[in-house]
Amino acid sequence: MKHSPEFRSKREEERAALKNTTGYKMWSILFTVLYPFIAIFTFLFSGIVMFFSGISRVLAYLFGRSSAKQ
């Protein structure tokens, strides 16, 4: 079966057909609306992880130093 001439491949034709589905359109809208929240959450979570990582490094340094004196 030959694909439509406006598409270069059968896969490209399938992708175009999938983009016309309701699910794809809903996902596109939801992702566009929720992206700022995802980005803010990622930024905050990264900051929290960096904070606790810093505490862990300081404690490892202090305990490593104190055990070396013994």
Image: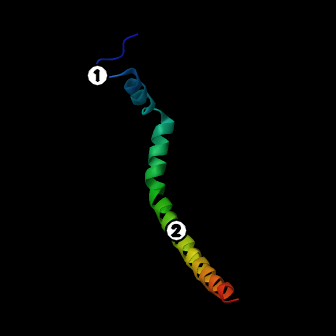
Quadrant for residue 8, please give it. top left
**Which residue is more in the foreground, 17 or 47?**
47
Give the farthest residue toward the left. Answer: 6
Q: Position of residue 28 (x, y in %)?
A: 44, 45
Give the farthest residue toward the right. Answer: 70
Q: Amino acid at mark 2?
A: Ser
Residue, disc 1: 6
Q: Helix, strand, or loop for circle 1?
A: loop
Q: Helix, strand, or loop for circle 2?
A: helix
Circle 1 crowding by C-alpha within 10 Å: few under 14, some 14–19, many from 20: few
Q: Amino acid at mark 1?
A: Glu
The residue shown at (51%, 72%) is: 47
**Which residue is more in the foreground, 69 or 50?**
69
Residue, disc 2: 46
Circle 2 crowding by C-alpha within 10 Å: few under 14, some 14–19, many from 20: few
Quadrant for residue 33, please give it. bottom left
- Between discs 1 and 2, the one toward the N terminus: 1
Q: Position of residue 46 (x, y in %)?
A: 52, 68
28 in relation to 11, above or below:
below
The residue shown at (38%, 24%) is: 13
29 in relation to 48, above or below:
above
> What sort of colour scheme is used for the picture?
rainbow
